[in-house]
Image: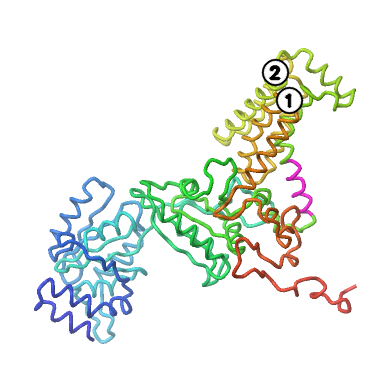
Amino acid sequence: MRSKRVIRRLGDWTPHDRRVRLDRLNAPVLSDAMAITPSDSSPAPPADWLTPDLDANIATLRDTLQKASDVVFRPLVILGGKRACIVYVDGLSDMELVDAHVLESLIQAHSPAPDTPHPLAITHVEAAAEQVTTAGVKPVRTFSAAVESIIVELQVVLFLEGTETAIALNAGGGENRAISEPDAEAVVRGPREGFNESLRTSITLLRRRIRTPDLAIETMQLGTYTQTKVALCYIEGIADSEIVNEVRTRLKRIDTDSIIDTGYIEELIEDNPFSPFPQIQNTERPDVVASMLVEGRVAILADGSPFALIAPINFWGALQAAEDYYERFPIVNLIRWLRYLFMFIALYLPSLYVAITTFHQEMLPTKLLLSIAAAREVTPLPAIAECLLMEITFEALREAGIRLPKAVGSAISIVGALVIGQAAVEAGIVSAPMVIVVAITGIASFVIPRYSFTIAIRILRFGMIILGGTIGLFGIIAFTLAVIVHLASLRSIGVPYLMPASPLTKKNMRDVITRPPHWAMRWRPIETSKPNRQRQSNAMAPAQRMPRGKRRM
């Protein structure tokens, strides 16, 4: 009732009094009764305030957005003969929603009272807000706020004749890629969903898996020109507050003109940008992000990117796949041991072959040495040049297979490797054992689940080959020690990269080399979940779940 009395007296007030008194008296009504979110209360210059003249407001807005040809100005006459205009970005607004919940509501508005079936004349912004049936509505009182709502928030803004307040309506839409399984993280058993480029869809997929009010999602905008929406996600009460504050501080410290993908954010917040090892994990799988959040880690999502960032991480997580926690633990342990074995093969096999055949022939059995010597008899190149040539050729074929269309990419990479390898052996440029070594090394690198970690192994492999071909096993050992020292000094958001092995945490070592059964994983990682370390009770163990006297024989 107080709101209606105030509206009747609007004609007796000056524009300044109308604005001040309406803000003071009607703020609770606008926020609660009509679901309008309070706008920014920071002072604006007088020239930035909207005026009661609709034509002047639209002219100023057109002048501001004159180079934005995709911004649509749709004039209309609402019920009661009052002129209005809606402004939106073409292609980024849900026009079906605008037609059904905005235009139709304003043109065919009716009084909510049952005893007054005649149409209601809309004469002020509050009545228009009551008639619009969209979920999100907020007032806009300045031109800068209107431009931000249209361009940044992708909202539909409604201007009315005779009022100094416009209405911003949540009607964002447009075309988005459908939810599908990520090609780079396919699994045999597990969810088939993946993030897409819509931040709202990605948050929905995450919220579907973690249905607790403790899931905190903080949004911010990064990039002077792109104004990219970024979401910082964590679980309150599990995530370490120091880690959350550190990630939040690093995000707010970003001052750049554009954030196109989460890859930009990764390079701007990681601890050591010159290290070949990834210190922040990226994934397209919502189930991976959900499992990491439950362990106390932090996730970063960005509008326009299907890849989520997870921090902090450690070295051992690069050899763990999402499927490890969906299959039974005996099978997973065997596969995980194979991953460790093939990681060492991908890193050391070419350099060991070059070092042994060049400097340490006495380490080989006589028959194997004679076989390798006979194969290399017609080869004009030394072992190190032969290995580098084949490795570079293999890397080129792998990149060609990725960049080419899917229909021909895999075929060209496989056929190219076979043809080039066979031709090189027949021409005597490389030896057959070298082709076998490079092929096994390439297969071993594909076993590693994380692509970014695979790239680090590929880079280090070339250093191993060069040192192994120049000073033998001593060079390989020295390079290995340098890599270990580098890994021990790395940090991921301040957390040691080799944890829980260094510093040693025995409780968390169970999920490093092996994967224990789910009923034995009682504790979360100590480095990320100091406030709440216990994951489950001890009653999950078989001895407690199935007492000996009640077991079925």
| Quadrant of image for the N terminus | bottom left
Dominant SS of magenta comes to: helix
The answer to whether the residues at label 2 and label 1 have Cβ atoms under 8 Å apart is yes
Residue 333 covered by magenta stretch: yes
Residue plotted at (89% across, 79% down): 549
**Is residue 514 depicted above or below 442 in this figure?**
below
Q: Could you tell whether 152 is left or right of 499 in the image?
A: left
Say which element carries label 1.
helix
Which residue is the site of mark 1?
435
Q: How is the image coloured?
A: rainbow
Q: Which mark is residue 268?
A: none
**Quarter of the image holding residue 470?**
top right
User: x and y percent of residue 85 in the render?
Assistant: 21, 61
Amino acid beneath label 2: Ala
Residue plotted at (85% across, 26% down): 364
Say which element carries label 2.
helix
Which residue is the site of mark 2?
424
Amino acid beneath label 1: Val
User: x and y percent of residue 337 in the render?
Assistant: 77, 48
Which region of the structure is painted magenta?
Answer: 331-342
Rate crowding at label 1 as few (under 14), some (14 to 19) or many (20 or more) other CA atoms within 10 Å: many
Q: Could you tell whether 475 is left or right of 296 in the image?
A: right
User: x and y percent of residue 131 in the render?
Assistant: 28, 73
The numbered mark, 2 or 1, whose residue comes first in the sequence reads 2
Residue 339 covered by magenta stretch: yes
How far apart, in angstroms, are the residues tagged by discs 2 and 1? Answer: 9 Å
Q: State the residue in front, 332 or 42.
A: 42
Q: State the residue in front, 245 or 29.
A: 245
| Quadrant of image for the C terminus | bottom right
